[in-house]
Amino acid sequence: MKHKKIVNKLLLWFLLISLVPLTTVTSIKYYIASSSQKKEVNNNLASIVDNKAKRLENYLNEKQKNAAAIAQIPNIVDAIEQYETAYKAYGINSLIYQQVDDKYRPFLSNYLEIFGYSDIFLVSQSGDAIFSIKRGKEFGTNYYNGSYNNSEIAKVFDRAKTLMQVEISNFSYYAATNEPAAFIASPVFKKNLIIGVVVLQLNNHEFNQVVNDYTGLGKTGETIVGSVIGQSIVFTSPTRHDQKAAFQRSVNIGKPQLHPKAGFPINVNLVQQQLHPLVQATYGIKGIGISIDYRGQETIAAWRYLPSINGGLLVKMDTAEAFISLNSLKNLVIILGIITIFLVTFAAIVVAKSISSPVVELTQIVQEFAQGNLHKQAPVVTHNEIGQLAESFNAMAKQLEENFETIQVREQELAIAKERLEAVLAKLSQEAQQLAAQLVQSEKMSSLGQLVAGVAHEINNPVNFIYGNLTPANQYIQDLLRLLQLYQRHYPHPIAEIQDEAEEIDLDFLVTDLPKLLVSMKVGAKRITEIVLSLRNFSRLDEAEMQAVNIHEGIDSTLMILGNRLKATSDRSAIEVIKEYSDLPLVECYVGQLNQVLMNILANALDALEESIVNSQWSESKPQIRIATELAGEQEVMIRIADNGLGIPKNLQARLFDPFFTTKPAGKGTGLGLSISYQIITEKHQGKLECVSSPGKGTEFVIVIPLNQLEARGTEG
C-alpha cells in the first residue's frame, strides 16, 4: 500500500508540475501575441489616421494661405473694382462688362491653373457674384437676397467679409455643379477698406486623392470624411466600396442618453459607447474601436476631428483581415495544447512508475545517513539517472570534509569579489549620473535648436516675400508720382473739388513722405532678415561635426536669443552688454555644443543679476555683462564672460561644476548646465573652464580652447 501511495503522489505531482506551467505559458504566449497583434493594428490605424488628418489639415491650411496671397494681388483688387463698376452700371451682358472680362479673365484663369482650384469667384461688398471662371448658376445673383443666400458659398462669403479674415466652408452639396464642394473666402482690401471678397472652390479631385490613399489599409480598408449637415454626418467623398457614397450616405447624429449627476461632468466613455465613431469625430473625440460599418461588416476603426471643415475623419478595415493571423494562431494553440496534454500524461505515467521504486529505497538510505551513519552506501542497481544519483550519494560522504574547507576558501574569495564589485558599481553609478545629465541637457538644447530653426524658417519665407515686393512697389509708386507731377504741370489749376481733396489729404506731404515710408519698410524687412539669420546661426542643427568658425557669431547669436531678458523691466533697468572682441582667426570646435556652453554661462549671469536686484542686495548703478575675447599664446583662444552681480561664496565655488549642484532657489535650477559645460570644454574641446568670483564684486567665467583641435589632440596623445 505504501509503495502504491508513493507512485500515485509522484504521478500527481509530475502531472501538475508539467501541465500547469505548460498551460500557463501557452495562455500567456497567446495573450501576449493577441495583445501585440491588437496593439499593432491599433497603432497602425492611429498612425494612418493621424497622418491622414495632418495631411488634410496641411492641404486645407495651404489652400487658405494661397487664398490670402491671391486676395493681396493688385490685379485682383483692380479686377473687383472694374467688374463691380461694369456690373452695377451696365449689367453682366453689356459690352462694357465684356471688355472688362476680356482684360482680366486670362490672368484669373491662369491663377486657377497655378493654384489648382475648381473655380474663382469675385464677390462685391454688397454680395453680388460679379465674376466666375465657369459662370455657374449662381453667377450674377446676390448672396444676401438671391436664391443661393443659404448656400455654403454665401455663408463663407459673409463670414470672410464680417470677420475680415480667410474662412473655409463645410463640404456641402453644390447645386450649381451637382457635386460636393467646399469654398475658401478671403477679403480684399484697398487702403485698409474692404472692397469685396475672392471665393475659391476647392478641387474635389485633389482632396479625394488625399482621402482615398489606402496605403497600409490592406484590401478592405477605406477612409471616410464626413461633414455636419443638419442632424446628420454626410459622406463628402467616395469610398473604396462605394464610389457614389458622396452625399448619398450619411450617419444620423442622434443624441446620447446621458444623465450626469449635479456637479459631475459628462462621461466621455458613455458618449463613445452610444455614438457612431464618425459622430464622435465631429464632437472632437478621437478614438479606436470595433464597430459595424455601412456594409454590415465588423470593422476596426480609428477616428479624428478635422477642425478646418468642422467634420470627422474615419479610417477602418475589416476585422477579418486585420486579425487573420490571430485567428490562425488561436486554432494552432488549441491543437498543440490537446496534443501536448496527451503526450505529457502518457510520459508522466511511464516515468512515475520507473522512478518511484528506486526513489523509495534511496530515501531509506538517506534517512540513515541523516541520522549520522556516514558509512552507509547506496546500492547501484542501474546506470541511468537514479544509478548516477546513488553513485553521487556515495561519493558525497567522502568529499564532505573536503567541501567544508573549499567552502571557507570560497567565502574569502566572495568577500574580496564583493568589495571589487561595490567599487565598480560606485564608479558606474557616477558615470551613469554624468551620462544622464549629458543626455537631458543635450535633448534640451536639441529641442531648443529645432524650435529656433523652425521659427527662423517660418519667418524667412514671408519676410522674403515682403522684402522682394518692396522694390516693385516703390517703382509703381514712383510711376504714379511722376504721373501726378505731369497732371500738376499741365493742369496747374484743377477744379475746386480736387484742390479741396488735395488739401484734405495733405498731398505735398504725402508725396514727400511716401518714398521715405517705403525706405523705412525696407530697412525693417532687412532687420528681420538679419534676426532670422542670427536665429539660424544659433541653432546650427546641421553642424554637428567639428569645423572652423567665427566664435563671435556664436556669441552674438546667443545674445540675440537672450535679448528679451536684457531689456528693461518694471523692476530694473536694461542690462548692458559690453563687448571687447579681439581680432581672432577661425576656431575649430563643435559649434552647437560651444553655443550650448555660451547659453548656459550667459543665462546664469542674467539669473545672478536678476536675483541680486529682486533680493534688494543691488548696490551698482547699472547691471552689466562684459564679454571679452583674446588670443592666449599662439594656439589657444580665451573667452571671458563677467557680470557685476554679488558673486559666489568661496565655500561653493569648488562645487560649481559638480552634477546636480546649484546655487539657485529650489525648483529653478537643475544643476546640470555648468557640469555639462565643463565636460564639453574639457573633454570635447581639450580646453579649460574656470570660475573666478569675489563676493560682492561679481563673477567671471574663463573659457580656453585650442585653435586647432586636431593638433591639440595629437600633442596630448
Image (cartoon, grey):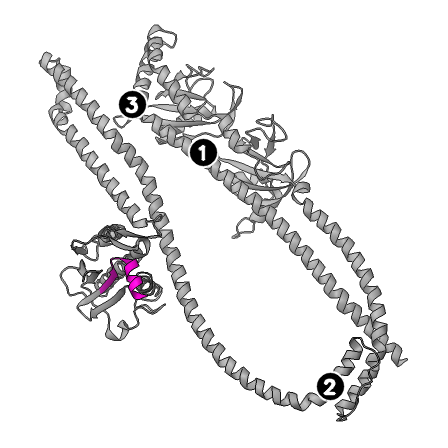
The residue type indicated by label 2 comes to Ala
Going by the image, does 385 lie left or right of 426?
Answer: right
| Residue 658 visible | yes
x then y, percent, for residue 367: 78, 88
Mark 1 or mark 2, which has the lower sequence index? 1
The residue type indicated by label 1 comes to Tyr
x then y, percent, for residue 555: 24, 53
Q: Is residue 712 magenta?
A: yes
Q: CA distance from mark 1 to mark 3?
A: 25 Å
Going by the image, does 28 lie left or right of 9?
Answer: left
Label 2 CA crowd tier, 10 Å (few <14, some 14–19, many 20+): few
Label 3 CA crowd tier, 10 Å (few <14, some 14–19, many 20+): few
Q: Tell me the residue that label 3 is attached to.
A: 74
Question: In what quadrant of the picture does the N terminus appear?
Answer: bottom right
Q: Tell me the residue that label 2 is attached to.
A: 395
Going by the image, does 17 lie left or right of 132?
Answer: right
Q: Tell me the residue that label 1 is attached to.
A: 59
